[in-house]
Image (cartoon, helix red, strand yellow):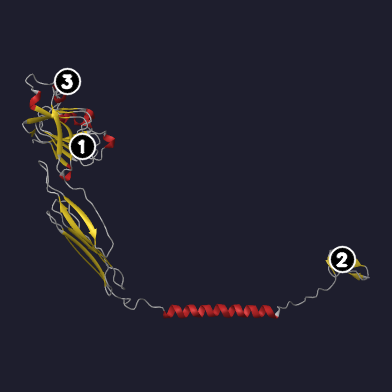
Amino acid sequence: MNNCPHCGEVLQEGAHFCPYCMTSLDDKTVIPTRIPKHKWRLLAATAALLFALFALGTVLLLTRGDDPTVPADAPITTTGSQAIGITGGTTTFSSIESGGNTATKSERGSTPTSTGGTDTATTSKKSGSTSSKTSSTTTTTTTTAAKGDSAQTNTVQSGNPSSDTETTTTTAATAVTYTYVIATQETAYPPGKAPYSFTPSDYVVITGVSGVATNGIYEVPKTIGDQTVIAIMPSAFAGVSDHVKTVILPTSVRTIWSNAFSGCYNLTDLYFSAKAIGIYEDAFPAVAQRIGTLTFHSPYDSRNFDFYYYRNIAGDYGAQWAQWNG
């Protein structure tokens, strides 16, 4: 009989397992694990490949250099100059990186004044081969202008045949034309406001406007021929609505009818010097559609036919008031 070496209980002869402490009585033999030779060869080859790649990368990193034509410590110099004149001028900007060639783009344009001007821009690139792009310009000036308007430059840029072609067309000032018809009592004044001495055949009303005024300033003439301009009819300025910014009315105008400035979202200034003038509330685009704030410029005592001073009621038109004596 044998005793369990773990719990001391009596076991049967030749028992391999203790039923009391659940312990195996057989000796465990550890068999060493061997790595096959072909796996050793694979590990050695992999290690050699990784080492070779590391060595190659190190060599490339040490031998790589920057562009030999540009020293690493080359300074960068930037210069610039600008000159703008009232009657035209030149604007020049240049940026140069030492040691390199320059890529140049030169264009000619017009300044906000009517005489035109020149804009030149020069920008350098990193050292290397020289590249260039040049656009030559032909400038045409329209000299025809209506009363109160000066000519504005119309510029067309045509590229050099051997380089890229660029074409830019700017809106030119053209003759402003006012279309009119003989006035009637109904078209000249608001209902019931015409004086007894009014002779319609002596007056005209503006029914349409065409042409592009310089800087968007439209000055309505006081007379056309021998007849006096007395009213601005509905949609009169609709044909030039994209260009209208300022309108100057003569003292002879007595009525601005509904929708006279329909679509004139850029209208910001209305000048009138008549002591009494009727302006319909919907003569202008809705406030929400306007690009800027509309300002009425008029004498201090300018009023409508109901004797309300515009200095007090400009806000009824979504406008503000400023004194102007013509």
Category of crowding for the residue at label 2, using alpha-carbon neighbours closer than 10 angstroms: few (below 14), some (14–19), many (at least 20): many
At a point 13% along the width and 48% down the height, the residue shown is 151
- What x and y, as percent, mark residue 307? 13, 23
In this rendered view, identify the residue nearer to me: 42 or 162.
Answer: 162
Q: Is residue 93 left or right of residue 5?
A: left
Spatial CA span between label 3 and label 2: 126 Å
Category of crowding for the residue at label 3, using alpha-carbon neighbours closer than 10 angstroms: few (below 14), some (14–19), many (at least 20): few
* One can see residue 252 in this view: no
Please identify the quadrant where the C terminus is shown.
top left
At a point 69% along the width and 81% down the height, the residue shown is 37
Front: mark 1 or 3: 3
Kindly state the secondary structure of the residue where label 3 is placed: loop
Please identify the quadrant where the N terminus is shown.
bottom right
Check disc 2 and give the amino acid type.
Cys
Q: Which residue is mark 3?
A: 191
Q: Which residue is mark 1?
A: 294
Q: As drawn, which residue projects farthest toward the front?
A: 161
Kindly state the secondary structure of the residue where label 1 is placed: strand
Spatial CA span between label 1 and label 3: 26 Å
Marked residue nearer the N-terminal end (1 or 2): 2
Q: Which residue is mark 2?
A: 18
Check disc 1 and give the amino acid type.
Leu
In this rendered view, identify the residue nearer to me: 212 or 54.
Answer: 212
Category of crowding for the residue at label 1, using alpha-carbon neighbours closer than 10 angstroms: few (below 14), some (14–19), many (at least 20): many
- What x and y, as percent, mark residue 213? 16, 43
Check disc 3 and give the amino acid type.
Pro
